[in-house]
Image: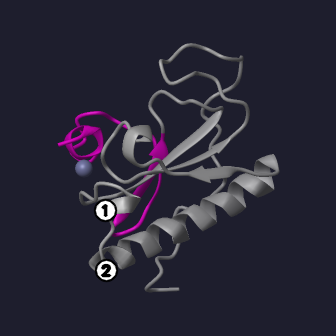
Amino acid sequence: MDFYCDQVLTGLTPVRRIAEFPRVLAFHHTQPYWPVHIVIIPKRHIASLAALEPGDLAVVHEMLTLAAELCRALTAEHGGCRLSSNCGDFQTTKHLHFYLHHGPRLRDEDGKPLAEGRTGDAPNIAPDATTPESA
Ligand SMILES: [Zn+2]
């Protein structure tokens, strides 16, 4: 399988959770590439954006709803953020994931440091964020 299915979703690799919806989890990247580096994943396996099927739309809706809440929190706290998702040769872990990040890039793709920076800034998101169904 992949890191998110085998390690994160099973709990074998502990992560600092930020928010959770029924189908989606957001947590701090375990080896951040930016001072703020949040990962948003579906709780069931979807290979990538390119692999989405009509039955996945509810999951994607939750991912974007959670991303929107985190974007608002990061923008309020840091002035802005960026949302990205890789496919194909650019996607190292073959499980759909969004990166939500802020600040200068800290490491290159090989893990080599690029700049000094702080890590672990947590946005001030309400822990009881509403799901799309209940909103
Ligand atoms: Zn997976």
Q: Residue at x 52, y 68 (%)?
A: 64
- Rendered image quadrant of residue 48: bottom left
Residue 15 badge = none
114 inside magenta stretch: no
* Disc 1 secondary structure class: helix
What quarter of the picture does the N terminus occupy? top left
* Disc 2 secondary structure class: helix
Residue 54 badge = 2
- Residues rendered magenta in the picture: 1-28
Residue occupied by mark 1: 51
**Observer able to see residue 126:** no
**Observer able to see residue 59:** yes
Q: Amino acid at mark 2?
A: Pro
Residue 115: x %, y % from top left: 71, 17
Q: Residue furthest left?
A: 1
Q: Nearer the viewer, residue 49 or 67?
A: 49
